[in-house]
Image (spheres, rainbow, N blue to C red):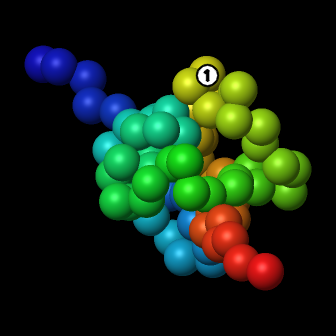
Amino acid sequence: MVPVEPAIVIHVNGTPHTLRRSLSIPELCDLLNIHPRLVAIEYNGEILHRQFWDTTYVQAGDRLEIVTIVGGG
């Protein structure tokens, strides 16, 4: 019998999302159809710098705020 990892629940912009496994930030953006070049991400209350996105994996209970960057004048 193959062990099954339990699903994890994270919150993105206040909405719960159930994931089958931990995902990196780029994988999460892809899953949510978010273009990663157009957003800033707060991860558990801290701004997550883009250089750490590939090595940051969401865990159960994490809270993310994903904000779209809009240009203007």
**Residue at coordinates 54% horizontally, 76% vertically from top-left?**
15
> In the image, 34: left or right of 31?
right
Front residue of 10 and 47: 47
**Residue at coordinates 36% horizontally, 48% vertically from top-left?**
30
Provide the residue designation for mark 1.
Answer: 55
> Does any portion of residue 44 appear in the rendered image?
no
State which quadrant residue 71 falls in.
Answer: bottom right
Front residue of 45 and 16: 45
User: Residue 4: x percent and y percent?
Assistant: 27, 31
Q: Amino acid at mark 1?
A: Thr
Front residue of 3 and 32: 32
Q: Quadrant of the C terminus?
A: bottom right
Q: Secondary structure at mark 1?
A: helix
**Residue at coordinates 56% horizontally, 25% vertically from top-left?**
54
**Residue at coordinates 61% horizontally, 68% vertically from top-left?**
68
User: Residue 31: x percent and y percent?
Assistant: 33, 52
Give neighbour class at mark 1: few <14, some 14-19, many 20+ (Cα, 10 Å): few
Front residue of 60 and 37: 37
> Does any portion of residue 16 appear in the rendered image?
yes
Q: Quadrant of the N terminus?
A: top left
State which quadrant residue 32 falls in.
Answer: bottom left
> In the image, 54: left or right of 19?
right
Looking at the image, is 24 positioned above or below residue 15?
above
- For the view shown, which residue lies furthest in the left direction? 1
